[in-house]
Amino acid sequence: MTTLSLIGIGTGNPDHVTGQAVKALNAADLILLPRKGEEKSDLADLRRQILAQVLTNPVPVAEYDVPTRSDQDDYLGAVNDWHDAIAKVWADAIATHLPEGGEVALMVWGDPSLYDSTLRIAARLPGLAVRVIPGITSLQALTAAHAIPLNTLAAPMTITTGRQLRDHGWPEGAVTLAVMLDRGGAFTTLDPEGLTIWWGAYVGMPEETLIHGPLAQVSDEILATRARLRTEHGWIMDIYLLRRGDDV
């Protein structure tokens, strides 16, 4: 019997790793560690740093190269094919390094339940038991960095993606909108009148960069800052909150 623990590790800050996560990593018989190419080697390095800091047992680590997602018009089809390819890599790694079964751990940015695909990928592997260790999300790290509540008083908040915002605009009835997985500038498709934005890149990390203000005034600054940071680091993780009205 093989159990896969999907362990939320926060946004790259080793201090985000919970005590429960540390216990799960040390109890594993194998840790899977993804690599996403030279441009994103920092991400693998951060995982290695976390392991060096928290492991007190000599747990074997199997590094693997994450397959590249096809860039095609059928977005969902491309994502499903990509997930199938990743599931095969996981299965091969587990079969090679843990043929008799056991405890496998995989560190996941943020929390496995929020806009992350590891649970869907794990569901492709028959006979695999899955356990989730919750982690701090980039959304929590963003609101903490800006010292703001996630929602206004007694009002709803909506979580969406840059693709959805770009394709469908402001969701009906939304007051506060958290936008994740934006490849850049989806907020420019909105009428900025009355909108305030709280933007953050690398939230919770030493490179953390924050911008806040009326969308009409800071939109260009965010775009320029994002482009500069991406060039400097070779990759970027950013997230932002949009809100109508004055209540923070």
Image: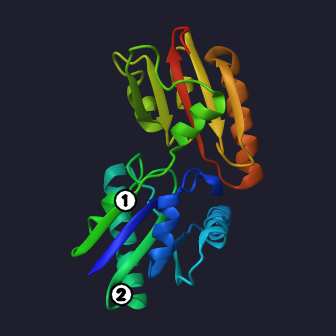
Q: Residue 86 at x, y = what percent?
A: 40, 70
Report the Cα–Cα distance between label 2 and label 1.
Answer: 21 Å
Q: Residue at x 44, y 13 (%)?
A: 153
Above or below, comparing residue 39 to residue 26 in the picture:
above
User: Quick one: label 1, few (<14), some, or many (20+) residues within 10 Å?
Assistant: some
Question: How many discs appear?
Answer: 2
Identify the amino acid type marked 1. Val
Numbered disc 2: secondary structure: helix
Q: Name the residue tied to disc 2.
A: 95
Q: Quadrant of residue 196?
A: top right
User: Quick one: label 2, few (<14), some, or many (20+) residues within 10 Å?
Assistant: few
Q: Name the residue tied to disc 1.
A: 132
Q: Nearer the viewer, residue 129 or 34?
A: 129
Identify the amino acid type marked 2. Ala
For residue 138, say whether it is visible: yes
Dividing the image into 4 quarters, which one contains the N terminus?
bottom left
Q: Is 75 positioned to the left or the right of 50 in the image?
A: left
Q: Is 234 positioned to the left or the right of 37 in the image?
A: right
Q: Residue 168 at x, y = what percent?
A: 38, 27
Answer with mark 2 or mark 1, whichever residue precedes in sequence. Answer: 2
Q: Quadrant of residue 97?
A: bottom left
Dividing the image into 4 quarters, which one contains the C terminus?
top right
For residue 184, say whether it is visible: no
Above or below, comparing residue 211 to residue 214 in the picture:
below
